[in-house]
Image (cartoon, rainbow, N blue to C red):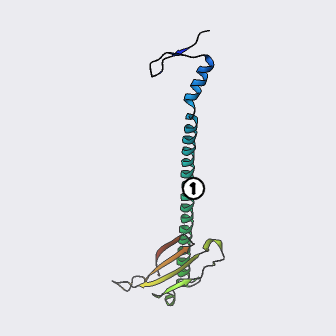
Amino acid sequence: MNKPCMLPMHHKLVCLSKNQLKSHSLQKQSGSAIVLAIFVILIISMLGVALVSLQQDGAKGTSYEVYASRAYLSAYSASEVALLALFPLNSSGADTSTCTSASFPVSLDTSDTGFHGCSANYQCQILSPVSSASLPTRYRVVSTAVCENAQTVTRRQIMVEATSQ
Protein backbone atom coordinates (compact mmCIF):
# COMPACT_ATOMS: atom_id res chain seq x y z
CA MET A 1 0.00 0.00 0.00
CA ASN A 2 1.42 3.32 -1.10
CA LYS A 3 1.55 6.06 1.43
CA PRO A 4 1.52 9.64 0.20
CA CYS A 5 4.51 11.53 1.41
CA MET A 6 4.75 15.18 2.40
CA LEU A 7 7.66 17.46 2.91
CA PRO A 8 6.69 19.78 5.78
CA MET A 9 8.45 23.02 6.53
CA HIS A 10 11.01 21.42 8.79
CA HIS A 11 12.33 19.48 5.74
CA LYS A 12 11.76 16.01 7.04
CA LEU A 13 10.00 13.59 4.71
CA VAL A 14 6.84 12.29 6.35
CA CYS A 15 4.74 9.50 4.84
CA LEU A 16 1.13 9.20 6.02
CA SER A 17 -1.69 6.77 5.41
CA LYS A 18 -4.98 7.99 3.85
CA ASN A 19 -6.71 8.23 7.24
CA GLN A 20 -3.79 10.10 8.73
CA LEU A 21 -3.68 12.42 5.70
CA LYS A 22 -7.42 13.18 6.01
CA SER A 23 -7.09 13.82 9.73
CA HIS A 24 -4.06 16.01 9.17
CA SER A 25 -5.82 18.20 6.51
CA LEU A 26 -8.90 18.62 8.74
CA GLN A 27 -6.70 19.80 11.59
CA LYS A 28 -5.13 22.41 9.34
CA GLN A 29 -8.58 23.73 8.32
CA SER A 30 -10.23 23.78 11.72
CA GLY A 31 -11.21 27.35 12.68
CA SER A 32 -11.21 28.87 9.19
CA ALA A 33 -14.94 28.18 8.74
CA ILE A 34 -15.69 30.00 12.00
CA VAL A 35 -13.71 33.04 10.89
CA LEU A 36 -15.48 33.03 7.53
CA ALA A 37 -18.91 32.68 9.19
CA ILE A 38 -18.21 35.57 11.56
CA PHE A 39 -17.06 37.72 8.64
CA VAL A 40 -20.24 36.97 6.65
CA ILE A 41 -22.44 37.69 9.69
CA LEU A 42 -20.70 41.04 10.24
CA ILE A 43 -21.12 42.06 6.59
CA ILE A 44 -24.82 41.12 6.56
CA SER A 45 -25.36 42.98 9.87
CA MET A 46 -23.74 46.14 8.51
CA LEU A 47 -25.92 45.96 5.38
CA GLY A 48 -29.02 45.55 7.57
CA VAL A 49 -28.10 48.59 9.68
CA ALA A 50 -27.52 50.65 6.52
CA LEU A 51 -30.90 49.64 5.08
CA VAL A 52 -32.73 50.52 8.30
CA SER A 53 -31.00 53.92 8.34
CA LEU A 54 -32.00 54.57 4.72
CA GLN A 55 -35.60 53.63 5.48
CA GLN A 56 -35.73 56.01 8.45
CA ASP A 57 -34.29 58.86 6.37
CA GLY A 58 -36.87 58.18 3.65
CA ALA A 59 -39.70 58.26 6.19
CA LYS A 60 -38.49 61.60 7.60
CA GLY A 61 -38.23 63.06 4.10
CA THR A 62 -41.74 61.94 3.24
CA SER A 63 -43.11 63.41 6.48
CA TYR A 64 -41.40 66.73 5.73
CA GLU A 65 -42.83 66.77 2.19
CA VAL A 66 -46.35 66.13 3.49
CA TYR A 67 -46.15 68.96 6.04
CA ALA A 68 -44.59 71.30 3.47
CA SER A 69 -47.50 70.60 1.10
CA ARG A 70 -50.00 71.19 3.90
CA ALA A 71 -48.34 74.51 4.76
CA TYR A 72 -48.35 75.60 1.11
CA LEU A 73 -52.01 74.71 0.63
CA SER A 74 -52.93 76.40 3.93
CA ALA A 75 -51.19 79.61 2.84
CA TYR A 76 -52.94 79.35 -0.53
CA SER A 77 -56.29 78.97 1.22
CA ALA A 78 -55.56 81.99 3.40
CA SER A 79 -54.81 84.10 0.33
CA GLU A 80 -58.11 82.97 -1.23
CA VAL A 81 -59.97 83.94 1.97
CA ALA A 82 -58.31 87.37 1.87
CA LEU A 83 -59.17 87.90 -1.80
CA LEU A 84 -62.77 86.83 -1.18
CA ALA A 85 -63.03 89.35 1.66
CA LEU A 86 -61.44 92.04 -0.54
CA PHE A 87 -63.51 91.28 -3.64
CA PRO A 88 -66.87 89.95 -2.39
CA LEU A 89 -69.07 88.00 -4.78
CA ASN A 90 -71.75 90.00 -6.64
CA SER A 91 -69.88 93.23 -5.95
CA SER A 92 -68.69 95.77 -8.49
CA GLY A 93 -65.47 96.77 -6.71
CA ALA A 94 -63.13 96.10 -3.88
CA ASP A 95 -64.17 96.43 -0.27
CA THR A 96 -61.22 98.46 0.99
CA SER A 97 -62.41 98.28 4.60
CA THR A 98 -61.33 94.62 4.67
CA CYS A 99 -57.79 95.46 3.55
CA THR A 100 -55.68 96.92 6.30
CA SER A 101 -52.09 96.43 7.23
CA ALA A 102 -53.06 94.27 10.19
CA SER A 103 -52.54 90.53 10.28
CA PHE A 104 -55.69 88.40 10.38
CA PRO A 105 -55.80 84.75 11.42
CA VAL A 106 -57.68 82.49 9.06
CA SER A 107 -60.07 80.04 10.63
CA LEU A 108 -59.13 76.70 9.11
CA ASP A 109 -61.18 73.63 9.89
CA THR A 110 -58.51 71.83 11.92
CA SER A 111 -60.71 68.75 12.31
CA ASP A 112 -60.18 68.22 8.59
CA THR A 113 -57.19 65.95 8.04
CA GLY A 114 -55.72 68.25 5.40
CA PHE A 115 -55.22 71.16 7.83
CA HIS A 116 -54.41 69.17 10.97
CA GLY A 117 -51.65 70.95 12.88
CA CYS A 118 -51.71 74.02 10.61
CA SER A 119 -52.44 77.69 11.22
CA ALA A 120 -52.57 80.51 8.70
CA ASN A 121 -52.92 84.28 8.59
CA TYR A 122 -52.81 86.98 5.98
CA GLN A 123 -51.82 90.59 5.75
CA CYS A 124 -53.42 92.95 3.24
CA GLN A 125 -51.85 96.19 2.06
CA ILE A 126 -53.17 98.89 -0.31
CA LEU A 127 -50.60 99.99 -2.88
CA SER A 128 -51.70 103.39 -4.16
CA PRO A 129 -50.71 104.37 -7.69
CA VAL A 130 -47.70 106.65 -7.64
CA SER A 131 -47.86 108.49 -10.95
CA SER A 132 -51.49 109.02 -11.81
CA ALA A 133 -54.92 108.79 -10.26
CA SER A 134 -56.24 107.09 -13.42
CA LEU A 135 -54.29 103.93 -12.62
CA PRO A 136 -56.13 101.23 -10.71
CA THR A 137 -55.43 100.62 -7.04
CA ARG A 138 -53.33 97.58 -6.30
CA TYR A 139 -53.70 95.32 -3.31
CA ARG A 140 -51.02 93.04 -1.92
CA VAL A 141 -52.00 90.02 0.16
CA VAL A 142 -49.26 88.09 1.94
CA SER A 143 -50.44 84.87 3.53
CA THR A 144 -48.33 82.75 5.86
CA ALA A 145 -49.03 79.24 7.09
CA VAL A 146 -47.25 77.12 9.68
CA CYS A 147 -47.77 73.38 10.01
CA GLU A 148 -46.13 71.44 12.77
CA ASN A 149 -45.97 68.13 14.56
CA ALA A 150 -43.58 66.83 17.22
CA GLN A 151 -40.58 66.58 14.86
CA THR A 152 -41.27 68.96 11.97
CA VAL A 153 -42.18 72.64 11.62
CA THR A 154 -42.79 73.95 8.12
CA ARG A 155 -43.65 77.49 7.09
CA ARG A 156 -44.81 78.69 3.69
CA GLN A 157 -45.60 82.21 2.52
CA ILE A 158 -47.50 83.30 -0.59
CA MET A 159 -47.79 86.84 -1.96
CA VAL A 160 -50.65 87.77 -4.29
CA GLU A 161 -51.26 91.13 -5.91
CA ALA A 162 -54.64 92.17 -7.32
CA THR A 163 -56.05 95.31 -8.92
CA SER A 164 -59.48 96.83 -8.90
CA GLN A 165 -60.78 98.32 -12.14
Residue 129 visible to the viewer: yes
Q: Is residue 140 above or below residue 5?
A: below
The quadrant in which residue 89 appears is: bottom right
Q: Where is residue 149 in the image (x, y as percent from the top left)?
A: 57, 72
Residue 92 visible to the viewer: no
Residue visible at 56% across and 42% down in the picture: 38
Pick the front one: 118 or 164: 118
Residue extending furthest top? 1
Residue visible at 56% across and 30% down in the picture: 29
The N terminus lies in quadrant: top right
Q: How crowded is mark 1: few (under 14 residues within 10 Å), some or many (20 or more)?
A: few
Q: Position of residue 31 (x, y in %)?
A: 56, 35
Q: Position of residue 87 (x, y in %)?
A: 53, 83
The quadrant in which residue 15 appears is: top right
Q: In this view, does 70 lie above or below 16?
A: below
Q: What element carries label 1?
A: helix
Q: Looking at the picture, which amino acid does disc 1 mark? A: Gln
Q: Where is residue 115 in the image (x, y as percent from the top left)?
A: 61, 74
Residue visible at 63% across and 77% down in the picture: 110
Pick the front one: 142 or 9: 9
Q: Mark 1 points at which residue?
A: 55
Pick the front one: 59 or 86: 59
Q: Is residue 112 above or below residue 11?
A: below
The quadrant in which residue 19 appears is: top right
Q: In this view, does 34 lie above or below 146?
A: above
Residue extending furthest right? 111
Residue visible at 47% across and 17% down in the picture: 12
Residue extending furthest left? 131
Pick the front one: 107 or 35: 35
Number of marks drawn: 1
